[in-house]
Image (spheres, helix red, strand yellow):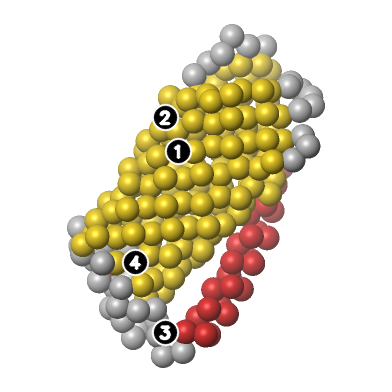
């Protein structure tokens, strides 16, 4: 198996396990407000927020050499405002910010995506995808190259996600989500094909108004 794929699975596993435990505890505390007591009705205004942790990578070419720089222990959040077209589909405008600051790494990125979330069967499981744009400040020390980019605007951004939510009230749902995001940047004189990727496991809160 590709070592990069193994590394990415490892940095997702820890936050996902922690978030799963939190969800189990919250579900236990919910008591009567357990799954099944309230229908998944989604028509109308939707407000949401995610908060979690994960990791990322910066892929680029410098002087013809392909480089992948891993960024561990990133944190991030997602805010959304949307509209439920039906119990099966919600269209949203999402703002996503993520970053990591240390002595050797300082990455701060923001992006805006237009997303479509699909709930197959109208239940709690969902898939979502979106496109948009964003910008980032990136500073990475050490080999194979020093990077210090300020306010780099992207050519585009894309995202995908999946998860499950439990309806704990007539208008409130609590969920667990896995989301991947990518920013694609214009070429610089030495740096080509630059992509900043982020994966985040998060707790998701949605209000259906």
As helix, strand or loop, the secondary structure at mark 1 comes to: strand
Q: Looking at the figure, which quarter contains the C terminus?
A: bottom left
- Residue 72 position within the rendered picture, expressed as x and y whole percent measured from the top left: 69, 45
Q: Is residue 8 above or below residue 104?
A: below
Q: Quadrant of residue 70?
A: top right
Residue 207's label in the rendered image is 4
Q: Residue furthest top?
A: 189
As helix, strand or loop, the secondary structure at mark 4 comes to: strand
Mark 2 or mark 4: whose residue is earlier in sequence: 2
Real-space CA distance between mark 2 and mark 3, rounded to the nearest whole angstrom: 40 Å
Q: Is residue 80 above or below residue 31?
A: above
Mark 2 or mark 3: whose residue is earlier in sequence: 3
Name the residue that disc number 2 marks: 156
Side of 46 relative to 28 (left or right): left
Number of residues whose C-alpha sits closer than 10 Å to that of mark 1, classed few (under 14), some (14–19) or many (20 or more) = many
Label 4 close to label 3 by CB (< 8 Å): no
Q: Residue at x 43, y 58 (%)?
A: 49
């Amino acid at each position: 198996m590709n070592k990069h794929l193994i590394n990415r699975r490892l940095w997702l596993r820890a936050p996902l396990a922690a978030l799963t435990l939190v969800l189990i505890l919250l579900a236990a505390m919910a008591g009567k407000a357990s799954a099944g007591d309230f229908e998944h009705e989604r028509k109308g205004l939707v407000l949401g927020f995610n908060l979690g942790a994960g990791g990322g990578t910066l892929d680029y070419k410098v002087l013809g050499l392909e480089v992948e720089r891993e960024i561990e222990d990133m944190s991030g959040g997602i805010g959304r405002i949307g509209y439920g077209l039906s119990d099966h589909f919600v269209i949203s405008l999402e703002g996503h910010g993520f970053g990591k600051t240390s002595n050797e790494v300082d990455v701060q990125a923001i992006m805006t995506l237009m997303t479509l979330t699909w709930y197959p069967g109208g239940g709690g499981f969902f898939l979502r995808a979106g496109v948009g744009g964003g910008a980032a400040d990136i500073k990475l020390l050490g080999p194979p190259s020093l990077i210090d980019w300020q306010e780099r605007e992207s050519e585009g951004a894309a995202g995908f996600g999946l998860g499950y939510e439990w309806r704990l009230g007539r208008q409130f749902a609590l969920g667990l989500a896995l989301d991947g995001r990518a920013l694609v940047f214009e070429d610089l004189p030495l740096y080509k094909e630059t992509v900043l990727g982020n994966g985040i496991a998060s707790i998701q809160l949605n209000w259906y108004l």
